[in-house]
Image (tube, rainbow, N blue to C red):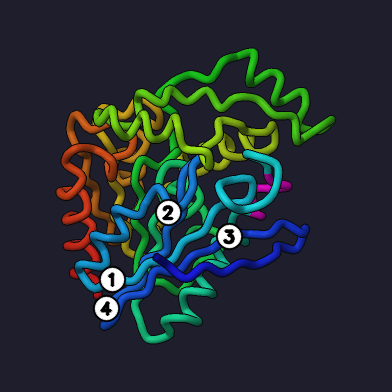
Amino acid sequence: MGNTFSWTTEDGIDIYGIDWPIANAKAIVCIVHGLGEHIHRYEHAIDYFHKNNIAVIGYDRRGHGRSKGKRGHTISYDAFLDEVDHLLGEAKKRYPSLPVFLYGHSMGGNIVLNFTLDRKPVINGVISTGAHIRLAFQPSSITLALGKMMRNIYPGFSQPNGLDVHLLSRDTKVVEAYKNDPYVHNQVTAITGLSMLEKADVLDHYTAAFPVPLLIMHGGADGITSPGGSKDFAARVRGDITLKIWDKFYHEIHNEPEQDLVFAEILGWIDGRV
């Protein structure tokens, strides 16, 4: 059990946060989850980190999980970055002497990469898994047209996100748990969806340096976000960049049957930078 906390954003959204402390921690990992899900889907990862003396802190994004707000909606992409900024502040307040790492998956990977480039935080590294840099499928032309039409008229216009849940993991128990999770949803609004696509395109064309050490990983058989996006990003960007493609793994590499190998890779990378 973690210690829950909350904060209210400038536009009045109550955000759910949770801190999982551990005695004698050597680092703190700040988790930023993916589209439609929530932080408690990472409890098995937190158990692994705890066994290796790493504390974890996380939150549910606005419109997700236990946080308030219309499902899948934001007032702007910057509002997502502001939430990460607040989470880092909480981490540094609670663990002032520890190295800090940002860990984002999928939509969360998109957010932590853009956050680090835009806000230049003082942190020790970024872990990106299955990042939305490029999609592995073509969104419906009707869905895109509707989103573009509604963005300025009614940015909160909501549609299903179109994710094929069977591509999350090769473990059918993970897929069934996702489908039956009351805190999971499949909604995305016009402003959220288009902002994510635009900021993914920024990453897909970024060519300068990455300001902190980066571990970027992707499932080689990811049918939701493209492993090629992560490969090309790692090849273009200068800095301390470590790329790992997990052959045959689906989108949620941390929920594959071989998940312990993924966590061990993360742990080894963190240990090399603590």
* SS at badge 1: strand
Tag 2, which secondary structure?
Answer: loop
Name the amino acid, label 1.
Answer: Ile
Verify whether residue 40 appears in magenta.
Answer: no
Q: Does residue 9 lie above or below 109 as drawn?
A: below
Nearer to us in this view, 72 or 68: 68
Q: CA distance from mark 4 to mark 1?
A: 6 Å
Count numbered badges in the picture.
Answer: 4
Say which residue label 2 marks: 208
Mark closer to the chain start, 4 or 1: 4
Residue at the right extreme? 153
Q: Nearer the viewer, residue 246 or 252?
A: 252
* Sequence-wise first label, 2 or 1: 1
Residue wearing tag 3: 16
Foreground mark, 4 or 3, reads 3
Q: Does residue 211 appear in this view? A: no
**Image quadrant where residue 268 sits:** bottom left
Which comes sooner in the sequence, label 4 or label 2?
4
Q: CA distance from mark 3 to mark 1?
A: 21 Å
Q: Could you tell me how far apart the alpha carbons at marks 3 and 2 are, in whole angstroms? A: 35 Å
The disc, 3 or 1, on the residue closer to the chain's N-terminal end is: 3
Specify start and end residues of the magenta stretch as a single range. Answer: 74-79
